[in-house]
Amino acid sequence: MKTFVVLLLLLLTLFITALHVSASSDDAWSNIEKQRLDTGGLSRDSFPEGFVFGTAASAYQVEGMASKEGRGPSIWDVFVKVPGNIVKNATGEVSVDQYHRYKEDVDLMHKLNFDAYRFSISWSRIFPNGKGKVNWKGVAYYNRLINSMLEKGITPYANLYHYDLPLALQEKYGGLLGDQVVKDFADYADFCFKTFGDRVKNWMTFNEPRVVAALGFDNGINPPNRCSKPFGNCTAGNSATEPYIAAHNLILSHAEAAKRYREKYQPKQKGRIGILLDFVWYEPLTRGKADNYAAQRARDFHVGWFLHPLVYGEYPRTMQEIVGERLPKFSKSDVKTVKNSFDFIGINQYTSYYMYDPHQPKPNVTGYQQDWNVGFAYERTKDPIGRRAYSQWLYEVPWGMYKAVTYIKERYGNPNVILAENGMDDPGNVTFPDALYDRERVNYYRSYLKELKRAMDDGANVTGYFAWSLLDNFEWLLGYSSRFGIVYVDFKTLKRYPKMSAYWFKQMLERKKH
Ligand code: GAL
């Protein structure tokens, strides 16, 4: 009897606590929604007619069902399973389960007044072995997702590759190091254009090929974890050559897919195709010549590595000189497919660093990062470049947005740019519901968007903006210890709670009633 009473009391306390937690979080939620937030003068009207606002995410980071419904493994699936690779050994096996909760998520986008969603298609969910047999359950999932977006008036922006190479191709021919990948990627892309292109009009081939090449083959911290001994903890690799080979194959794969799209599908489907490039702004530390050159080298080795071939048909001169024979060459026919192989360029812009000339003799071990021959700084005469977010690489530098976008405009003939990712993270263990009051994120978005607008007012041809990300999600090496969402996710219940920044967007993006 005594134990029964104790048990009953315990249950009652648990019930009351649960009630309290849900009541207080719901209160917090509706309190935020009612507040009028400072948009800093920004509204839809601050941007040109037709300017698109959306959020971005990627398949492995949000879908879950990673080894279910016929999906084949990607190079990330094996990597996350090795203990110690990811914070708390987290995986994307379940993540935020968008595979089942896509309707709720698309609904949220709609309620928050967004126009578009940039998602990615998991190659190995469509082709479990990278090529050959199709997994029709995967195809059905993307059909459901796309159709639900269209029902809610959310425009789909589909990216074909977000770090997740099918493992089968890695094992078969070394993945991005094998030139067979060019045809396999183009075939996969072709299948997606054919299958989804009646409804998807905005295509992207690769997300951040620079990150793929550098983190996968120079320091080897991301799969397939290849590097030279001095640069990381890899069992094999060559940081002097492999990043350049992987990047070359990425460029050729992009170009081949774009060619297929333009020749076979674009005339009928009337969509457009682009690529997503990450771009950190590099500001010279001092006004000296050497630091200016260092910053320029950094920009060339970063965004120029991909954008220069796409616009001008060759790698930046600085890279050609420094990398020499290790840099693959484009044949005459490659140049034909590569040059101008885009309708728009997606730029992922988060942060900026100072660059200086290290005045060091050439190092005797060679690698991609060594080739830059620069020093990184995060403060100038003791003034930090910006507040650091949770991720150690992410400093908040709004003026870097202006400079990055303006640089693309001036150096690359003012192409059509979509600002395809921008955002900041909080630590994963923030307490709830305090986490919903993400004032710093509101500041971040407001200040960066103002700078984006300034660049556009000065002539930059930017036609869209995507926040990273709608939901807290699987943040690669950091697992769930970093939260980038404008919507908080309780990783136990998978319940979604919009943060203040979500309501900030909702208010900023309000549509005028006519
Ligand atoms: C980008 C990447 C995303 C996301 C974000 C925040 O570089 O495309 O997948 O993780 O960074 O780190």
Image (cartoon, helix red, strand yellow):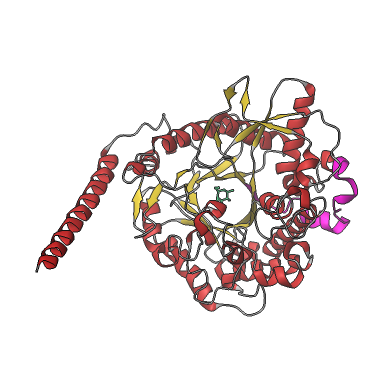
Towards the viewer: 432 or 309: 432
Quadrant assignment, res 154: bottom left
What x and y, as percent, mark residue 442? 42, 36
Quick one: 243 or 159, which is closer to the camera? Answer: 243
Which residues fall within the magenta stretch? 320-346
The answer to whether residue 311 is seen in the rendering is: no
Query: Which of the 4 image quadrants contains residue 1?
Result: bottom left
On screen, residue 346 versus residue 9, left or right, reads right
Q: Whole-percent x and y of residue 243?
A: 76, 53
Q: Is residue 193 visible?
A: yes
Q: Is residue 445 above or below residue 492?
A: above
Q: Residue furthest front?
A: 2
- Which residue of the protein is positioned furthest toward the left in this rendering? 1
Is residue 331 highlighted in magenta? yes
Residue 512: horizontal and vertical position, in percent?
35, 41
- Is residue 438 highlighted in magenta? no
Q: Quadrant of the C terminus?
A: top left
Q: 507 and 383: which one is in front?
A: 383
Please provide percent x and percent y for residue 310: 75, 49
Query: 395 left or right of 361?
Result: left
Q: For this view, does 339 lie left or right of residue 195?
A: right
Residue located 74% across and 51% down the image: 218
Q: Give the mark count.
A: 0
- Quarter of the image holding residue 271? bottom right
